[in-house]
Image: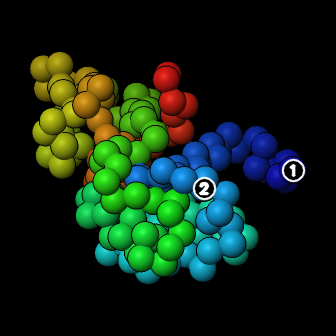
Amino acid sequence: MGSRRDFFSFKKTPSVINLPYIKGSIDVCTECRGYCVNACEESIIFKKEGEIPYLDFKNKGCIFCKKCAFVCEEKGKAVLNSLMENIIEGKAKIDVSLCLSYHQVICLSCQDVCKTSIKFSGMFYPEILNTCTACGLCVSICPQGAISIVESQKGK
């Protein structure tokens, strides 16, 4: 349990977002040395000892280069498979209380990096479309930190 200060600060705990290309049991990753971490050129894969690796989009997004999957296959771990689709089990979400566009300030930063999955109604009100792959490129580019990738359950 966190401190009283943490409780009243209303800080959101970031979602743990799994890597793309998962085919096998991700529990095997707890014993792995995390070869995928070093393989990622974007430096968005992180792993703590004894835990599964996760994605952090604070500075960059996933470009779906598949290097994490290639190294996993090469090391014989069989958790990530390079033949899987370029989709991350997550969903982009906009916090409208932070988004500049929702406050009538023209900002198209998110759409500049994602022309296919972010649509604007007029100059304001960005919407995340169903074509979103949860790559996280929009997260780091947002000047207000209004976009996050949250966990999504399959089938929802």
For this rendering, which residue is in front, 134 or 50?
50
Is residue 40 something one can see in this rendering? yes
Is residue 135 something one can see in this rendering? no
Taking 118 as reference, is 29 left or right?
A: right
Give the mark nearer the N terminus: 2 vs 1.
1
Q: In which quarter of the image is residue 149?
A: top left
Which amino acid type is shown beneath numbered disc 2? Ile
Tag shown at residue 26: 2
For this rendering, which residue is in front, 141 or 91?
91
Residue 93 picture location, percent across and down: 42, 33
Indicate the colouring scheme: rainbow
What residue is at 57 percent from the left and 64 percent from the top? 53
The residue indicated by pointer 1 is 1
Q: Is mark 1 on a helix, strand or loop?
A: loop
Taking 32 as reference, is 41 left or right?
A: left
Query: Which is in the foreground here, disc 2 or disc 1?
Result: 2
Which amino acid type is shown beneath numbered disc 1? Met
- Is 74 rendered above or below residue 127? below
Q: Is mark 2 on a helix, strand or loop?
A: helix
What crowding class fits label 2: few (fewer than 14 Cα within 10 Å), some (14-19), or many (20 or more)? some
Residue 136 picture location, percent across and down: 35, 50
**Number of numbered markers:** 2
What residue is at 58 percent from the left and 46 percent from the top? 15
For this rendering, which residue is in front, 125 or 103?
125
- Are the residues at dot 2 and dot 1 in contact (C-beta closer than 8 Å)? no
Tag shown at residue 18: none
Residue 80 picture location, percent across and down: 45, 59
What residue is at 47 percent from the left and 52 percent from the top? 22
Mark 2 and mark 1: Cα distance apart in space: 26 Å
Residue 54 picture location, percent across and down: 54, 59
Taking 129 as reference, is 111 left or right?
A: left
